[in-house]
Amino acid sequence: MRFLDAAAVAALGPTGAVRAITDALRGGLDPATDTPRSAVGLAHGQFLLMPSEAPAAAGVKVVTVAPGNPARGLPRIQAVYLLFDGETLALRAVLDGTALTTLRTPAVSVAAVLPALPDRPLRVAVVGAGPQATGHVATLAAVRPLARATHLVRDPSRTPLDAVRLGSADADEALRAADVVVCATSARSPLFDSSLLRDDAVVVAVGSHEPDARELDAPLLGRATVVVEDVATALREAGDVVLAIAEGTLAAADLVPVRDLVTGAVPPPADRPLVFKSVGMSWQDLVVAAAMVG
């Protein structure tokens, strides 16, 4: 049995993680068959349990959410991943689950939107400055050169990144110019006016998995091709999608499963934005963990 700490998990790298996700989807993996995550209430927070199975392996990510931890100087969310042999169910490896999430989430996003990315240096606007924000920049840079990456945050003085204040003229200009916009925040309401975005913009939203929280406004989803990991999961957990449908700008029948875009069954749009809304699914952790362990 192996233990992979954060450095060992990161060693797969963005390119390897994107390749693992892409190969799995092209190889026949159907996210619709994945087991939904479940929550278990605890006295001081909750467990999130994310199990998944493939022919050669099975695994489960155990996530702890402790709302009181930040006041103690500890992370609010922590995780561990257990990887088992698919036939004997013997434990093969224990992985740093937080590092796995940090790697796999942007890998899924980039695998999803790669067919729509222009083949030139990208101008990227990233709302947020945390690990997922920087991870998406690094993963985009692994598949395309970046002309510029600008972080849009509420308080630029709190980050050493190249950042501008969200809502400022500079932030609006970054959104107008962006080939790719990434939203990786804990926001519960739309972060910006989507009329700023170009008709060929690619937008990724990964910040929430709750049906009443969203980072994107309904008009954007109404004028975009909306790609999701799995339609049923999005209708259950993706607030950006759920609320846009409730407001009448989007229909469930319009949603495109990511598998269809990655395999080429559905071509990327040529005349409208592409939005990829991700809530995170268990199969993603298993695919990337199995690629690390071999």
Image: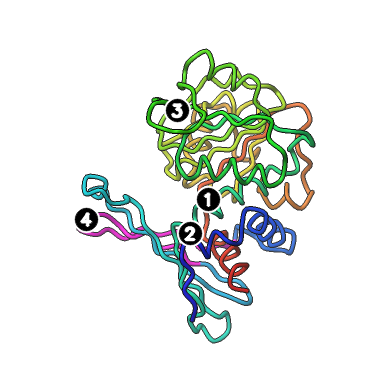
Q: x and y percent of residue 132 in the render?
A: 50, 44
Q: Which mark sits nearer the N-terminus, 3 or 1?
A: 3
At 72% from the left edge and 63% from the top edge, which residue is drawn? 28
User: Distance from label 2 to label 1 (Cα)?
Assistant: 8 Å
Give the overall secondary structure of the magenta segment.
strand
Q: Which residue matches tag 1?
A: 233
Graded by Cα atoms within 10 Å as few (under 14), some (14 to 19) or many (20 or more), the crowding at tag 2 reads some
Mark 4 in CB contact with mark 2 (< 8 angstroms): no
- Helix, strand or loop status at disc 4: loop
Position of residue 111 in the picture relative to residue 90 (left or right): right
User: Distance from label 3 to label 1 (Cα)?
Assistant: 29 Å
Disc 4 residue type (three-letter): His
Q: x and y percent of residue 135 in the render?
A: 54, 45
Q: Which mark sits nearer the N-terminus, 4 or 3?
A: 4
Of all residues, the one furthest to the bottom in this rendering is: 88
Mark 2 in CB contact with mark 1 (< 8 angstroms): yes
Q: Which mark sits nearer the N-terminus, 2 or 1?
A: 2
Q: Which residue matches tag 2?
A: 36
What are the residue bounds of the magenta stretch? 33-51
Disc 2 residue type (three-letter): Pro
Disc 1 residue type (three-letter): Thr
State the count of labels. 4
Q: x and y percent of residue 162 in the render?
A: 52, 29
Q: Which residue matches tag 4?
A: 44
Label of residue 77 in the image:
none
**Considering only vertical position in the picture, is 118 above or below 173?**
below
Label of residue 153 in the image:
3
At 63% from the left edge and 67% from the top edge, which residue is drawn? 291
Q: Which mark sits nearer the N-terminus, 4 or 2?
A: 2
